[in-house]
Amino acid sequence: MTAATTRRPAGPPLTVPDYEVIVIGAGFGGIGTGIKLKQAGIHDFVILEQADDIGGTWRDNTYPGVAVDVTSFTYSFSFEMNPNWSRAYAPGTELKAYADHCVDKYVLREHIRLNTKMVSGEFDAVNHLWRGTTADGEVITARYVVGAPGVLTQPKLPDIPGVADFAGETLHTARWDHSVDLEGKRVAVIGTGATSVQLVPSIADRVKTLAVYQRTPIWVAPKPDLGIPTPLRRVFRNIPGTQKSVRAATSTLTETVMTLGIVHNRQLPLLVKGIEALCTAHLWRQVRDPELRAKLTPHYGFGCKRPTFSNEYFRTFTRPHVELVTDGIERITETGIVTRDGRHREIDVLVLATGFKVFEKGNTPAYPIHGLDGRELGDWWDENRYQAYQGTTVPGFPNLFFISGPYGFTGGSYFQLIENQARHFLRCLKEARRTGATWVEVKPEAHQRYFDYVQRRQPSTVFYNNNCAASNSYYFDRHGDSPILRPSSAVEAWWDSKTFALSDYQFKRPDAAVRRVRSVRATEGVGA
């Protein structure tokens, strides 16, 4: 069946699934999985996207100044390098265009269903398939489900009294409304994370006054954001090896910081201390006022929360109409913000740069997923800590794979994560096909072995050695764990995706009774 085929209404359990694979999400995770499926000769799949367009993060985030904060050479598929980046750190519009390019080049649109939001999933242990229900009540079935909704997708609103009472314009950076004119307005920005670092310098010239409310300062390094001239782009297009070389260099640099600095912080603390010294010197050069500089200086170690790059952020606070507010917010009124020192600042526009829900119940997973014996994945993770074998599978949830599962991302290139996890899934799918299996489930002992490995590695990471408790970082969940990062090198993660033991999974065939029913239904044309 194709994505355009009319679906059967919800009804009795099906023995033949609508698709072999359902991919949830049409951001880069879903796009990369779809490409890899097609390259493997697998075409019986659909990509379900809840929005009206593809692109995920780069569709949703269009705030002023939005750009990638990993070099564009690294932040792209290894098999589809883009020679047309305008800058070393491409703006968001170019990332969205790259997503569209990949979808069109690899002919994925015929597999994508937009405006299709999954609201529940349930595994059918008799027929070895997943049954998903959409927001409009449609039931769609698949042998396998690949969850690729991304990590930075659900905006997080601040828990501040009165935030809903503000009578002016309120914007969240992840849902920017370009019809709101900031020219000459009194603007307040709540939040000083990586998004705010890009946004604040981009709007400072347009506003009358700008107050930035900071709870936790952020490490900011100089940004080597060079424009890529047309002749060099031409070289990249005509001599592919040149771009591969640049990609190798930028990826190696990222890997050095993330693996040696973040993962092996206990063994090599001087590397992170050196980066902190670079950031501190950068701050000192741009802000000479010692009081302001002290407010902008983090009191936790580099790497505890997402660091970022900017050549303008610090300097923006030295402008007379820009104020850094570090007094806590007491409440928001109809006309402004009251801080704990009793001061009320009147504003016209309130900007929430408050980030995203990441590893939180209700967001990971984004909807209820029921596996064996009625076990719900969100509840299970909340009770037992976030964990997944190689960051992709969980026992008790057969035929379910994740792109951005707990402890999957090494912190370098998100695109390497996508390629690794898609490779992992395809190895399992191909083995199931080879053996005639329709049930693929990671063994509990393999899953536990990986989680134990993660826990052995965690004490050496920056998260446990650099005063991270003061960082207010989305890297940490309510258990005190940091499940967003796999404590290993990118090379190790790549190698594991190619060589993990297939014996870590149990592959089951349907019993004879189910096979007979399936055979009869297939003969009658049901689900064909």
Image: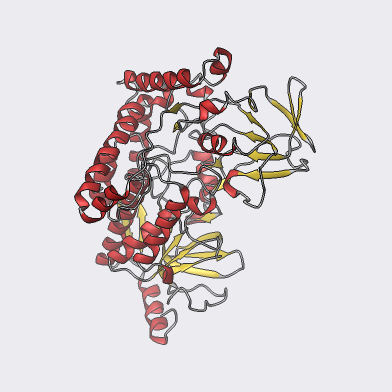
**At 34% from the left edge and 53% from the top edge, which residue is drawn?**
84
- Horizontal arrangement in the rendering, residue 469 relative to residue 227 (left or right): right
- In this rendering, the answer to whether 267 lies above or below 183 is above
Coloration of the structure image:
secondary structure
Residue 340: x %, y % from top left = 73, 22
> Residue shown at 38%/48% (left/top)?
86
- Residue 471, above or below 145: above
In the current view of this chain or complex, which residue is farthest to the bottom?
524
Q: Quadrant of the C terminus?
A: bottom left
Total numbered labels:
0
262 w.r.t. 273: above or below: below
Instruction: Determine whether, in the image, residue 224 is placed left or right of residue 470.
Output: left
Foreground: 275 or 183?
Answer: 183
Give me the residue at 36% from left, 28% from top: 262
Query: How far across and down, in percent of the image, does residue 352 sit?
Result: 63, 39
Residue that extends furthest to the right in the rendered view of this protein: 334
Q: Nearer the viewer, residue 318 or 177?
A: 318
Q: Quadrant of residue 246?
A: top left
Q: Position of residue 133 (x, y in %)?
A: 56, 65
User: Residue 269 sits in which quadrant?
Assistant: top left
Give the percent coordinates (x, y) of residue 16.
Answer: 42, 74
- 316 vs 76: above or below: above
Q: Report whether residue 7 is seen.
A: yes
Residue 399 in sight here: no
Q: Please name whichever residue, 37 or 237, is drawn nearer the observer in this view of the structure.
A: 237
Residue appearing at x 70%, y 34% in the figure: 160
Q: Quadrant of the N terminus?
A: bottom left
